[in-house]
Image: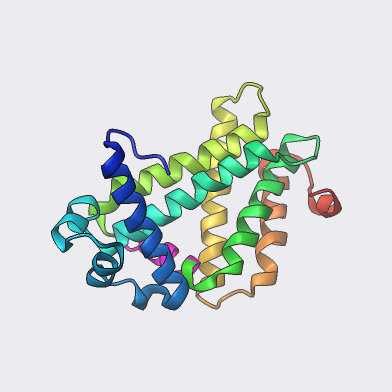
Amino acid sequence: MRSRGLTKAQAARRERMVETTLTLAVEGGWDAVQMREVSARADVAIGTLYRYFPSKENLLVSVMLEQIRALADRLNERPPKVDSGAERVDAVLRRANTALQAFPQVTTAMIRALVSGNTDIAPVVGRVRDEMRSLLAVAYAAGGDVTDDDLLRIDLLSDVWLATLISWISGTEDASVVQPRLSTAVGVLLGTSTEDQQGHR
């Protein structure tokens, strides 16, 4: 877990609070994540918790941020074995969606926090956006240059990804449509159809 500007002890404390939040979300989703319960389980004073994370939404979006960073680390260790930039982006989204759909209660809690409209969490929401953009840009470029136009299309794809996740967690769409819809969006925005590449992930 990356905790810039914190001492080793502070970083460990922050990590413990984030991991406790994740555990609670696994156990019971949004409703299970209560600030006093996080404080008790993480063995930190309630005031300390609020200094690091001023709200439940901040905590849950921070969990999402760490999940994206963990995915980036895994991709560095085991990058997608496909050739084109579009196929690599599709593979990254496929891995992300597999993880998110494995724990629907956690995903629902994180997305609910992300789109809560709480302006106090704008900085951490911005970091989630930036980390996702970086993740997809690295996959797309594979060491090459990324143009401003590339970044615009990647940002649009991130918007589609979030909208598709919202449709899934709200029950509007079945989980089975998430990846096919994103694969279509990758093809439209990044210029290469990826639907026939599923066996190469």
Identity of the residue drawn at 65% across and 64% down = 178
What is the x, y in percent for residue 77?
A: 66, 38
Which quadrant holds residue 174?
bottom right
The extreme left residue here reads 47
Residue 114 counted in the magenta span: yes
- Picture layout, residue 41 above or below residue 121: below
State the quadrant of the N terminus: top left
- Picture layout, residue 131 above or below residue 61: above
The extreme top residue here reads 145
Along the viewing direction, whichever of 114 and 103 lies nearer the viewer: 103
Residue 201 counted in the magenta span: no
Identity of the residue drawn at 45% across and 49% down = 66
In the shown orientation, is residue 199 left or right of residue 147?
A: right
What is the span of residues highlighted in magenta in the rendered image? Answer: 107-117
In the shown orientation, is residue 52 left or right of residue 73?
A: left
Report the number of discs.
0
In the shown orientation, is residue 15 left or right of residue 132?
A: left
What is the x, y in percent for residue 190?
A: 69, 39
- The reply to whether residue 115 is visible in this rendering is no
Q: How is the image coloured?
A: rainbow
In the shown orientation, is residue 52 left or right of residue 165?
A: left
- Picture layout, residue 144 above or below residue 127: above
Along the viewing direction, whichever of 11 and 148 lies nearer the viewer: 11
Identity of the residue drawn at 31% across and 38% down = 8
Along the viewing direction, whichever of 172 and 138 lies nearer the viewer: 138
Which quadrant holds residue 110?
bottom left
What is the x, y in percent for residue 194?
A: 79, 48
Along the viewing direction, whichever of 147 and 74 lies nearer the viewer: 74
- The reply to whether residue 122 is visible in this rendering is yes
What is the x, y in percent for residue 199?
A: 86, 53
| Magenta segment main secondary structure | helix
